[in-house]
Image (cartoon, helix red, strand yellow):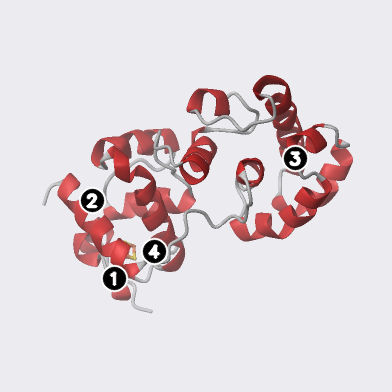
Amino acid sequence: MNIKDRARKIMQVLSESYPDAPYTYLNYNNEYQLLIATILSASTTDACVNRVIPILFERYPGPQDLMMANIRDIIDVIRPCGTYNRKAHYIRESARLIVERFAGRIPCNMKDLISLPGVNRKTANVVLSVAFRVNEGVVVDTHVMRVTQRIGFTDEMKSRDKVERILMQVIPRPQWYEYSRLIGTHGRRTCKARRPQCSTCSISYVCRYYATHQPIHT
Ligand code: SF4
């Protein structure tokens, strides 16, 4: 089976395994909230972000409110998310640019999104695909990175941009976000970082890791 056929098979099986897979594990009500939550989610868990954002968005319900905030007050709220100094500046400055450059609206294209502080391709891809249903790339978060490597689509271990470029060749464009949705959920629920549940995995028969390692039975 070539790599594109394997990808097709994996997505078909996982769509049956995870019919309830959400498009994001972050809680949000609008594009502004999704963007800010995604910036905060760098190097921390979605659960951690979901704990702090109700307070953050109650105090700063829109970019006009956030751009005027005192940086210390933002830090007090987002401290559990880690690298809070940098993230506080990122979200306040992004809010200012959204107001001043984009008339208070969240941009819906890659070029404008990645011009905002704290927004890389992954962040932009989340906003574009989840909020606007635009497939400009593949969301490569920590789960997608790990599972993609294990199933054998790449040997790249560090660069998310390189993995994204490979996936954009392997996965048909209309399914780019579907890939992230299904593979991300598989990484969270089955192909976990420390203890992949290979013995119950629905795609083990097309997995390079499974073929080359002693399966871990749990
Ligand atoms: S067989 Fe194991 S390593 Fe491969 S995708 Fe499944 S859980 Fe992950």
Location of mark 4 (residue): 191
Q: Residues within 10 Å of mark 4 (few under 14, many from 20)?
A: many
Label 4, secondary structure: give it. Answer: loop
User: Which residue is located at x 43 percent, y 55 percent?
Assistant: 184
Q: Nearer the viewer, mark 3 or mark 2?
A: 3
Res 159 seen here: no
Are the residues flagged by discs 4 and 2 in contact, CB closer than 8 Å? Answer: no
Q: Quadrant of residue 150?
A: bottom left
Q: Position of residue 51 (x, y in %)?
A: 71, 60
Label 1, secondary structure: give it: loop
- Say if mark 3 contacts mark 4, CB within 8 Å: no
Tell me the mark number nearer the camera, choosing from 4 and 2: 2
Q: Quadrant of the C terminus?
A: bottom left
Numbered label attached to residue 77: none
Q: Nearer the viewer, residue 90 or 58?
A: 58
Mark 3 residue's CB less than 8 Å from ligand 1: no
Is the residue under label 1 in contact with that under label 4 (CB below 8 Å)?
Answer: no
Mark 1 CB lies closer than 8 A to ligand 1: yes
Which residue is denoted by mark 3 in the rendering? 62
For the point 43% across and 37% down, the residue is 134
What percent of the width, then of the height, locates residue 132? 49, 40
Amino acid tagged 1: Pro
Q: Quarter containing ligand 1?
A: bottom left
